[in-house]
């Protein structure tokens, strides 16, 4: 009985800590025309009137919805801990995409369709809303416009490639994790440094997607990076967060 009580206390304490961390991300909603984009924001840990960086993190397909909670499943705890350091003082935004929608401009989830006709020319609604949200935050918050970063995993990896290609003027660097690129517009983003990550054994999004994107970008500019995790499946974001080096790399990048 004593052992059970100790284990139960540890378990409930961990749940409380996790809930506390999620509550540090404030609930917000962005209105665009007749649509709304739920998002959570982690404000700078240390108050300052100086302009600070902005990080946009795009979730994967499994976290789609409208509860404004699921998008924190992967990455929230990592950013919460890292943002306590003065050198990482910044705004961190986790928007949420609704079910049956996506960040990138495909008619169907691209990891389920290999049809080239799946690509469309216009930016997706939720991709557009993320861009509009960024521009709104620039007006309303003390954002350093030379240091706006974007990262995402799986569906969010696709979205990261896509939004940097759509609006390269906005971003200083990008971290697509286990995603894929739209090669019809990828050339637009060659001047924006990418650090691309993928698991060698990914059975959801083929690793060749990231290899091809990196090879294309690297042939244009040498400032792009690629890391492939051996013996790792789709959940390569766990390796990215465990290592954490991408954050130092991100914060070293500036448009000017």
Image (spheres, helix red, strand yellow):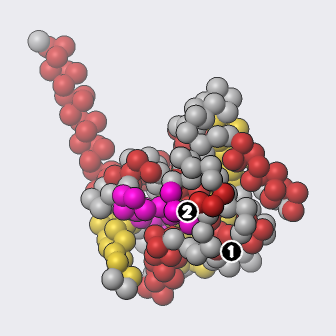
Q: Secondary structure at mark 1?
A: loop
Give percent across and percent down for residue 227: 72, 42
> What's drawn in magenta, residue-wise?
90-108
Q: Secondary structure at mark 2?
A: loop
- Would residue 24 be seen by someone viewing this image from the given angle? no
Q: Is residue 255 above or below residue 112?
A: below
Asked whether, in this view, residue 140 is left or right of residue 160, the answer is: left
What residue is disc 1 on?
Answer: 168
For discs 1 and 2, the disc positioned in front in the rendered view: 2
Give the camera-side residue of 94 and 164: 164
Give the camera-side residue of 59 and 61: 61
What residue is disc 2 on?
Answer: 106
Q: Is residue 101 above or below residue 141?
A: above
- For residue 200, which quarter of the picture? top right
Majority secondary structure in the magenta region: loop
Give percent across and percent down for residue 68: 31, 60
Q: Residue at x 57, y 49 (%)?
A: 113
């Amino acid at each position: 009985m004593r052992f059970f009580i100790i284990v139960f206390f540890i378990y409930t304490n961990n749940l409380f800590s996790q809930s506390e961390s999620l509550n540090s991300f404030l609930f917000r909603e962005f209105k665009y025309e007749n649509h709304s984009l739920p998002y959570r924001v982690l404000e700078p840990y240390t108050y300052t009137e100086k302009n600070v960086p902005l990080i946009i993190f795009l979730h994967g397909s499994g976290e789609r919805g409208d509860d404004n909670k699921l998008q924190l499943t992967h990455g929230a705890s990592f950013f919460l801990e890292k943002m306590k350091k003065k050198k990482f003082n910044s705004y961190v935004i986790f928007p949420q995409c609704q079910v049956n929608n996506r960040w990138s401009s495909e008619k169907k989830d691209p990891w389920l369709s290999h049809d080239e006709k799946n690509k469309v020319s216009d930016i997706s609604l939720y991709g557009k809303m993320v861009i509009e949200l960024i521009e709104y935050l620039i007006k309303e918050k003390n954002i350093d416009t030379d240091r706006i970063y974007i990262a995402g995993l799986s569906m969010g990896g696709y979205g990261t490639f896509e939004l940097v290609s759509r609006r390269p003027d906005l971003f200083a660097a990008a971290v697509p994790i286990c995603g894929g690129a739209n090669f019809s517009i990828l050339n637009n983003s060659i001047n924006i440094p990418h650090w691309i990550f993928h698991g060698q054994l990914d059975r959801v999004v083929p690793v060749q997607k990231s290899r091809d994107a990196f090879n294309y970008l690297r042939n244009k500019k040498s400032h792009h990076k690629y890391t492939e995790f051996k013996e790792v499946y789709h959940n390569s974001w766990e390796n990215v967060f465990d290592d954490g080096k991408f954050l130092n790399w991100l914060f070293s990048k500036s448009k000017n």
